Image (spheres, rainbow, N blue to C red):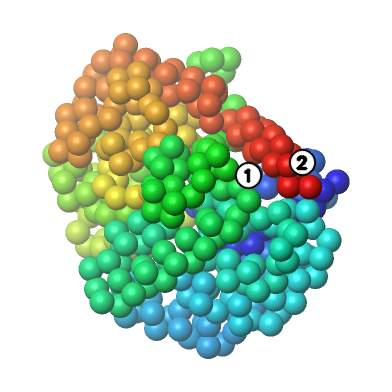
Amino acid sequence: MRNIVVLNDFQICPANHGGKIRIYNVYKNLSRKYNVTYICFGESKNIEKKQINENFVEVSVPKGIFHKNIEKTAGKFLGISIDDIIAMFFCKYNQQLISTAKNCFSDCDIVVASLPYMYPAIEKCVNKDTFLVYESQNVEFLLKKSLLGKSFVGNLLCKYVKKIEGEVVSKSDIVFAITNEDRNEIQNIYNRDPSKMYISPNGVDLSQFETLYTGNDLINEKIIEKPIIIFLGSGHPPNVEAAKNIIENIAPQKEDFYFLICGSVCWSLNREKIGKNVGLAFMVSEEEKLELYRVSDVAINPMLRGSGTNIKMLDYMAAGLPVISTPVGARGLNLENGTNAIICDMSEFAIKIEQVLQNEELYSKLSNGGRRIVNEKYDWDIIVEDMENEFEKNLMEFE
């Protein structure tokens, strides 16, 4: 079996937010044909190894004390976490990380930079004969610019992200982008040869959702009289903004509906301002998430900023829930408005939710249409098989 070594700044177990979910599923599936070592930073004082399966191991390396202190200080100063950018500064100076990477690189066929933030360490360790892959999840420079670009310090950090992202894009033998839009942006910003750029969309593990169905019929259980409208999100700033829009703009218009906000996004919300028809579920396990989908009636995604694609959208549709999303929330998924989901401005969410709930034919059409497109295009098995083909084809040319 060929050996793949992947570097990224965060641990992927448990896989409880979009970035972790993608990495975990991509390399779990690739480990059927490759030995995969995933190297990252961890919070323990010692190097730890977690055997995910027979051919897939996560190796987490401790951060230095100065690294940790800078993370805390920078987060407080800027008002948002920039742990990934801090990792980009410190990774090449962490001797345990460099030693671990060098040992793994000595016997590997493919090195993957998953996101650009550990590339300075990769550049320090890798030799010219190594096949290098960049697996992006967003156009990181544009994403950071939208989050940090309003301050002088933020602009400096964005320029550094652009520099490192540009280096890994130009030095990689192949580049994976989540969407066509991201691929075009990367190509235009960094002048990358498009012939070595490929689309690898986000996906979903459809087997997890089988318990929500009897045959092809969606099981929906009622636990309260009001319809339940669900939104799931991590503490990522665009998710926080979306959750606040639900609380401040959507929920007050529909007091006869119950809005359930789930995930680590809840920690960033002011509970004193939450109305009686809004509930916070905070962190939920995969099993709990499925149960919440089972009792929900409609899923919403009122996001106004972001890059890449939202894995939550794929979860919603795999669960058979009718979905109402902004164009930003539905970006990169090639959804047909009115068939796979309702795509509209946030100002229309309240009335669209009501229309879906009152129209059984529309409800069924969206439920079936969403699940159908996920089955056809966004199953992890299909996505990873395409990645395998690109690996092998390009490796043959490289060798």
Q: Nearer the viewer, mark 1 or mark 2?
A: 2
**Label 1 Cα neighbours within 10 Å, binned few <14 / some 14-19 / many ≥20:** many
Q: Residue at x 44, y 51 (%)?
A: 191
Q: Is residue 287 visible?
A: no
**Residue placed most toward the observer, 62 or 113:** 113
Where is residue 247? Give x, y as percent.
Answer: 22, 50
**Relative to 30, residue 84 above or below:** below
Which residue is identified by label 2? Answer: 396
**Residue placed most toward the observer, 319 or 52:** 52
Q: Earlier in the sequence, mark 1 or mark 2?
A: 1
Residue type, label 1:
Asn
Residue lying furthest bottom: 66
**Residue placed most toward the observer, 388 or 21:** 388
Q: Residue at x 33, y 40 (%)?
A: 329
Which structural element holds mark 1?
Answer: helix
Q: Give the side of residue 188 with respect to residue 123, left or right.
A: left
Where is residue 199? Give x, y as percent.
Answer: 53, 38
Q: Give the side of residue 27 with respect to residue 22, left or right.
A: right
Q: Which mark is residue 25?
A: 1
Q: Residue at x 64, y 33 (%)?
A: 386
Which structural element holds mark 2?
Answer: helix
Q: Give the side of residue 153 with respect to residue 81, left or right.
A: left
Q: Quadrant of residue 367?
A: top left
Where is residue 210? Give x, y as percent.
Answer: 59, 27
